[in-house]
Image (cartoon, rainbow, N blue to C red):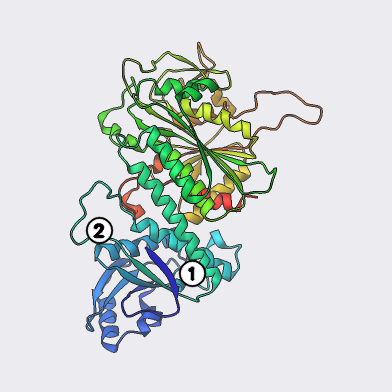
Amino acid sequence: MNIQLWSKIKNSSVPVLFLKNKGKAKEHHFFKLLSEGDKNYIGRFLNKNSDDEFSRSLLLPSGKKAIVILVKENKGKFPLRKTIISMRRIILLARKEKIKDIAVNLNDFLPTTNYKLPSFADASAGRQTEKIAELMATQFELANFEFNTYKTKPKTGWLSVDSVLVISDENTALKKAVANGKIIGEEINKARALSNTPGGDMTPQKLAEAAVKSGRASGFKVKVLNEAQIKKLGMGGIIGVSKGSAERPRFIIMEYMKGKKGEKPIALVGKGVTFDTGGLNLKPSSYIYEMHMDMSGGAAVIHTIAALARLKVKKNIVGLVPAVENMPSGSSYHPGDLLKTLNGKTIEVLDTDAEGRVILADALEYSKKYKPELVIDIATLTGAAMAALGQRASAIFSTDLKIENEMREAGEKTGDYVWPLPLWEEYEEEIKGTFGDFANVGKTRYGGAITGAVFLWQFIKSDVRHETKDKKQKEIPWVHLDIAPRMTSIESDSLAKGAAGASIGLLIKFLREFR
């Protein structure tokens, strides 16, 4: 999609009248440019329509088209959350009506004079405009995406918007903001495409190849460890989970080091289960068909780093993705198996369908070799997170409240919402093993998202717990994002069916602004 700033509308572009108040339609920039006949037609349409909110494509008396979208303000307030959905709805309606070229007025999305978007309240008017322009470009890209790789292309082509003309000042800062937003949207869509790819095609090796391709295109280093190398390191969790599959495991290591020399990196760790049957503890048929998306955390890490590289962010970032298939066979790992992990601790396997945390245990331990300033893991870890939060927010767990709040704020600014769940040491009792150090599921069926997070916590905690000469050993700040609730889009997202690209937008926002 071509998104460009322009000072005036082109005749070929269909204008979008984005209205927050019916009575102010005559004040809209595009309305003033219409012929009297077209103005009267739109005026009559608005007067007859009693709905508080609607989206319509109109054929005007002049033969031209116009898109009219009415949204409802609440006492002059229009939350950023509604702005994000409205941006997507514009593209969805244009696609539905087979409109290829549209024009929008950037001012339509800016805060009204008596209401400032809380998420951008700290920004000057100019910076707010740039932030909205970037956000708009991202949301337009997300709404224009549909995974049709395996479909036969219609003779008339795919339903997509080719060009968006953004009417605004043509200054350099705004142009850069639009370009940046487009990059972010493109990388999120690439991750969605990876996640949507069927498990028969998206194997651990193919996921590794996708990372290598992305690294070459965007400018970051990628190294892929094979099964023998993984085994030699002592990553028994990864080896154990992969045993039942004909597809051998891979461990993907990505390095983007453009920060200050000697500056500690931030480590991103993504779950890369390219298909999860549940193993010998086989999943029910109603849940299994979407399990090619169980590598969405891995896809998020790959394309978060790709976006940061393309945006030329001056940070040191490491990405780690353990990639496996979890399959049932005569060679599968068993309930009751004891797996020795990279740090020497053992995992008692009580359920082979709790495999994500088993492979992440090795990856989290491996991240420590970089002496990171912060570790963030991203995983479609538990259905329990969805049971707790529904499908509108991912779960966030953190050992650092300040970082947790910053990530929540980043989510609000990007439409990629997260909500905290407790990370308390009291829950460690739930995952104590009988014959191994840790059990991979809790003692009861309750609080599964929490016990999953607490399990991972054991592999990021400092092993040494004693006073040094100077101070107590400092643990690495850690964040766990359970994106299972947001693995797929829902109707109210105004996105195509399939992978939602959860966590990428907020990670990019957070990492660009992280101290």
- In the picture as drawn, the residue positioned furthest to the front comes out as 216
308 or 346: nearer the viewer: 308
Local crowd size for mark 2, using a 10 Å CA cut-off: few (<14), some (14–19), many (≥20)? few
Please provide percent x and percent y for residue 283.
Answer: 31, 27
Please provide percent x and percent y for residue 493.
Answer: 36, 53
Q: Which residue is mark 1?
A: 110
Residue type indicated by callout 2: Trp
Please provide percent x and percent y for residue 132.
Answer: 49, 65
Q: Is residue 17 left or right of residue 361?
A: left
**Residue at x 44%, y 18% (from the top left corner):** 349
Label 2, secondary structure: give it.
loop
Q: Which residue is mark 2?
A: 158
**Residue at x 31%, y 72% (from the top left corner):** 68
- In the picture as drawn, the residue positioned furthest to the left comes out as 155
Vertical comparison of 512 with 135: above or below = above
179 or 334: nearer the viewer: 179
The Cα–Cα distance between marks 2 and 1, rounded to whole angstroms, is 31 Å
**Residue at x 54%, y 59% (from the top left corner):** 119
Residue type indicated by callout 1: Leu
- In the picture as drawn, the residue positioned furthest to the bottom comes out as 36
Residue 115 in view in this figure: no
